[in-house]
Image: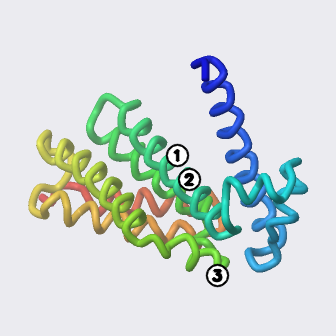
Amino acid sequence: MPRIWKDTIETHRAAVRDAAVDVTAALVTEQGVRAVTMSEIAERTGIGRATLYKYFPDVETILRRWHEREIGRHLDQLAAARDAAAEPLERLRAVLETFATIAHGSHGHRDAELGAILHRNAEEVIQAEGEVQRLVADVLRDGATVGQVRSDVAPEELATFCLHALAAAGTLKSKDAVKRLVDVTLAGLRPSG
């Protein structure tokens, strides 16, 4: 098969997969995870049910693919926030604000059944959490090196503190409340004395 044809087919397949994932996420938001069917996904995606089954065996698999994509997007957002600021304290604020904004946007996966499905692949979630933990710890370490962040607590412990504190942003009702939570978290990171 000529390379150009193979590339075109792969591009088409990726587009179909992405469209099915997008449609599924929208349907779950509208109807809840139990109400979504493969038939409805196929219809809203504009493909036949048999074609959808060539890509995904069930709704749960599509949701896991969506979750993988969201995790990657969130990690990219955190890295971009870190890389956009020059000074360590600005980097830290940018990363923490981005994390809190992501947590606020997810609203803690209020649909318990959806949360259970998305977190069945514990290895993937643990790996992503580890990447976030390392990213935050590295930014904290940089801040401690220049005296802008407390150095009496290990950066890894401070990262755990930050991430757990800011996960509460998922329960907050406003962006102003999220900003206040970030400010309080940053206050706890200041050097003592």
Q: Could you tell me which residue is drawn at 39 percent across and 40 percent down? A: 79
Q: Secondary structure at mark 3?
A: helix
Q: Could you tell me which residue is drawn at 20 percent across and 44 percent down? A: 143
Q: For residue 80, what is the image quadrant? A: top left
Question: At which x and y percent is residue 189?
Answer: 26, 58
Q: Viewed as shown, does residue 176 lie left or right of 155?
A: right
CA gap, disc 2 and disc 1: 5 Å
Q: Viewed as shown, does residue 34 lie left or right of 157?
A: right
Q: Could you tell me which residue is drawn at 39 percent across and 69 percent down? A: 165
Q: Which quadrant: the N terminus?
A: top right
Q: Secondary structure at mark 2?
A: helix
Instruction: Give amino acid for label 2.
Output: Glu
Q: Is residue 116 above or below residue 189?
A: below
Label 2: few (<14), some or many (≥20) within 10 Å? Answer: few
Task: For the residues labelled 3 and 2, say whether their Cβ atoms are less than 8 Å apart.
Answer: no
Instruction: Give amino acid for label 1.
Output: Arg
Task: For the residues labelled 2 and 1, say whether their Cβ atoms are less than 8 Å apart.
Answer: yes
User: Which mark identifies residue 73?
Assistant: 1
Q: Can you identify the residue that label 2 sits on?
A: 70
Q: Can you identify the residue that label 3 sits on?
A: 113
Q: For residue 50, what is the image quadrant? A: bottom right
Q: Which quadrant: the C terminus?
A: bottom left
Which is more N-terminal, label 2 or label 3? Answer: 2
